[in-house]
Image: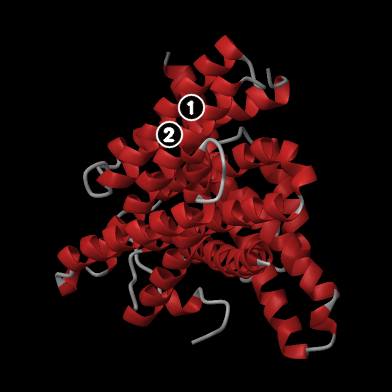
Amino acid sequence: MMAAIILVCSVVFLLQFFVSYCRSLIAASVKHPLSAEVQDVTGIKNSATGDDFDRVIQLLQLCPDRPEDRSGIQAIGAYFGLLGAVRASVARLIPSLLAWTETERGQCTYFAAVTLERRIAFSRDMFAQQLET
Amino acid sequence: MPGLFGNLIWLVGILCEAAVLVCAFKKRALRRYLFLNVYMAGVLVVELGRYKVLSQFGFNSLQYSYYYYYSDAILTIFLYFALTTLYAHVFSEMKAERYLKFGALLLLGGTAAFSGAVVLGSPTRFLTHFVIELSQNLYFVGLVLTYVLWGAILKLRETRTRLIQLVLSLGVYFSLLAANYAIRNLIPSLSAAYLPVAQIFGIFLPLAWAYAFWRLPEEARLVPSRLAVIPR
């Protein structure tokens, strides 16, 4: 009985912490303006949509991996999946929830685009260092 | 011995824990979040020792089990105190550090007494059962305390992005481990999967902390009410 209560509490707290953590990651990146180059590559001009997420992730995977970005992008990927599940189930019944999931999914895409920009800059730095040596 | 996957998880964990210390040092956050870094250094040392015990005695040995559960209990107590230092950061303007320390010790003593009472009836290996019970209970107490701290952050409108991310990642970590312990107690047949799953969960915290130290400057600010699941 006690273990069941602990399990239920843990899952509820986990969801709350996880969503808030992902939103804090997104909030930290949302102020970062995208360069014209990344806007061209990703097709994101003013606001991103959730439909672009997979494409931006594919572009991300073409760039050399950065260990410090790994936890962020994995967490956001899981959050995007969670939003997709909510959108396909509960949100169909509640229109305001559907709008909220759409906004959140768009911000996930923006986060991925900002990470892409950082990876491109990182690759350029590495290339420049190799040329110097 | 754990297979290739187990060794890979162990290696990634070690690298991530070392990355936290390097990132904190490089970004001059070592002293500011001293107890968090001491905890991470402790995890690093324990993980290295774990590998030594594992290679010497084997995965199914009594020595490895003792080492695992005793070191886990010590690390959980360390993490508990690391959490109280995050409280001190959030309540720094109230000058409530002395009360926080007293409250933390009182709660730790209470949890230890409760754990002792639960395992009092066990006929053998009282200390080992006590240590395992204490770890489990401290994970849950830590989870509840992190949730209270998150509530305080929202209420006090704390805006330090790095501090917020450290607290939230700790909350995710405590929730994962508390849920893992609870599932093991509910379904004992799954206990073989407990250690590998706990190892995988263990990677999350150093990754998230390394990210927070490396990516976010101490001056970074955000509006915490926008992060709440239920808008405030």
Q: Chain of mark 1?
A: B
Front-most of residues B138 and A50: B138
Q: Position of residue B83 (x, y in %)?
A: 36, 56
Front-most of residues A64 and B28: B28
In the image, residue B45 above or below residue A99: above
Give neighbour class at mark 2: few <14, some 14-19, many 20+ (Cα, 10 Å).
Answer: many
Q: CA distance from mark 1 to mark 2?
A: 6 Å
Q: Chain of mark 2?
A: B
Report the side of A106 relative to A30 (left or right).
Answer: right
User: Considering the numbered disc 2 on the image, is that residue within a helix, a strand or a loop?
Assistant: helix
Q: Position of residue A15 (x, y in %)?
A: 63, 67
In the image, residue B45 above or below residue B231: above
Q: Which mark is residue B43?
A: 2
Front-most of residues A69 and A88: A88
**Identity, as a three-letter code, of the amino acid under mark 2:** Val
Let me know if marks 1 and 2 both belong to one chain.
yes
Q: Which mark is residue B232?
A: none
Q: Residue at x 71, y 20 (%)?
A: B4
**Identity, as a three-letter code, of the amino acid under mark 1:** Glu
Q: Position of residue A130 (x, y in %)?
A: 48, 18
Give neighbour class at mark 1: few <14, some 14-19, many 20+ (Cα, 10 Å).
Answer: some
Q: Residue at x 33, y 51 (%)?
A: B82
The residue to which callout 1 is attached is: B47
Colour basis = secondary structure
On the question of residue A48 being in view, the answer is no
